[in-house]
Amino acid sequence: MLSNKLIPNDVTYGTIISGLVKQGRAVDGVHVLMALEERGFRANEYGYSALISGLFREGKSEEALKLWGKMIEKGCKPNTVVYSALIDGLCREGKPYEAEEFLFQMINVGYKANAFTYSSLIRGFFQVGKSDKAILIWKEMAEKDCKDNEVCYSVLIHGLCKDGKLKDALMIWKHVLAKGLTPDTVAYSSMIHGLCNAGSIEQGLDLFNEMLCKASNSRPDVITFNILINALCRQNRISHAIDLLNSMLDLGCDPDSVTCKIFLKTLKEKVDPPQDGREFLDELVLRLYKQQRIVGASKIIEVMLQSFLHPKVSTWEKVVREICKPKKILAFYFWSTESWASLLAANFLEKVEILIGVVPPTLDFFQDGKKASEVIGADVQVEGYHGSTHVSIPRLLNTLPSEKALRTSHLLHTSVLLQPIYGRRIA
């Protein structure tokens, strides 16, 4: 852009900062902002707002408050958007009373708090167990003629249900319906959770069925299904829970680790004879695989490995091959040190640039680390797709535990579990 003699403007810099924040790189965004200000660029309130929100989301509250101070020093007056970002961030940090002080300051300088500002405060007080204070904030919101919305009511219902105040939550629920508003997914899930915890599972199921008929903003998600599946399993209604799992899959909602763990616990404790759940989850992986829902399938395999339930070799190969396909990388599966030896003996590494060695669901590979280390040699390095650190294969194998049981997630970051380890020849 600069080489073409085009001068960046506020929109250009704002887009760069916003992009960094979305990538979880708010600190880099601050550095960019500081560098730009040294060149005479003056950031506006929206740039500061994005950075303050991003820093709080990344758990960097001190940096966020320092940036707030710098903003004031540079004469950039905060508006409702910036105040709301700061209030929301402090509430998420568990500091609602500090956030409330900024609300008072905001009102005193002439700005009007909006529904987002009040919703953040309400959530913040619920988060620290101050439900009465949260209700007072809601009432204050009405007194200030601030129009509430579905999000605000969703926060209220969620907080009250979590606090065990089901009657109050039902009162708010009826109030929402009377106003002609449609509760969102969070509100529905919270009410269903509250009803199930109170032993009213049938009412929870009725609300779930009602939810299915509503608009897209209130479709059930994995959290909704997990709440009901867990409640049904606790009552030993396993067949009904499986029916709900089938409905979940039919609606295109993939089960997560919580779903899997609920069924693992149920099959172990409530089925006669007890089952370890390996076959159940393996079939679930294959079902997702056939529907080309590979991300969902890989998450279930991850849970299996963490639970010492190795998937069938055929299941493992199918899923890993699908993961490798879009990456256009040739994959090979090494089930023992002999597999490595045969490839090296054939000078295979001389013929390909990239070698895929997917961590297999077998113990043979891990039990003979020294031998594998000697066979592979030191001229190959491995790296994860999301990592920049190169670790030699011998070093990797030598650090593996010798126990027969190995939590694979300890070896690889969970998100990289089924993304192959690959070796690139460096000699």
Image (spheres, grey):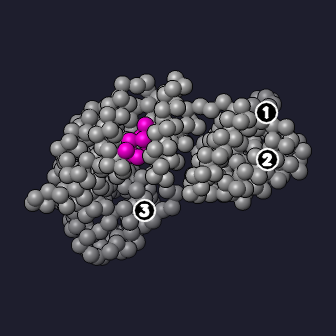
Count of numbered circles on the image = 3
Q: CA distance from mark 2 to mark 3?
A: 58 Å
Q: Indicate which disc, 1 or 2, sits on the residue closer to the N terminus.
A: 1
Q: CA distance from mark 3 to mark 1?
A: 44 Å
Residue 232 colored in magenta in the image: no
Q: Closer to the camera, 102 or 255?
A: 102
Task: Using a 10 Å C-alpha cutoff, classify the residue at mark 1 as few (fewer than 14 neighbours), some (14 to 19) or many (20 or more).
Answer: few
Specify whether residue 299 is in view. no
Residue 76 picture location, percent across and down:
86, 42
Q: Give the labeled residue for mark 3.
A: 381
Element type at mark 1: helix
Specify whether residue 116 is in view. yes
- Give, as a three-letter code, the residue at label 2: Phe
Name the residue rendered at 42%, 41% in the picture.
Answer: 191
Task: Name the quarter where the N terminus is drawn.
Answer: top right
Q: Closer to the camera, 399 or 252?
A: 252
Q: Give the labeled residue for mark 2.
A: 104
Q: Give the numbered dot on residue 10.
A: 1
Residue bounds of the magenta highlight: 188-195
Name the residue rendered at 73%, 51% in the picture.
Answer: 100
Q: Is 417 rendered above or below residue 292?
A: below
Name the residue rendered at 67%, 35% in the picture.
Answer: 142
Task: Name the quarter where the C terminus is drawn.
Answer: bottom left
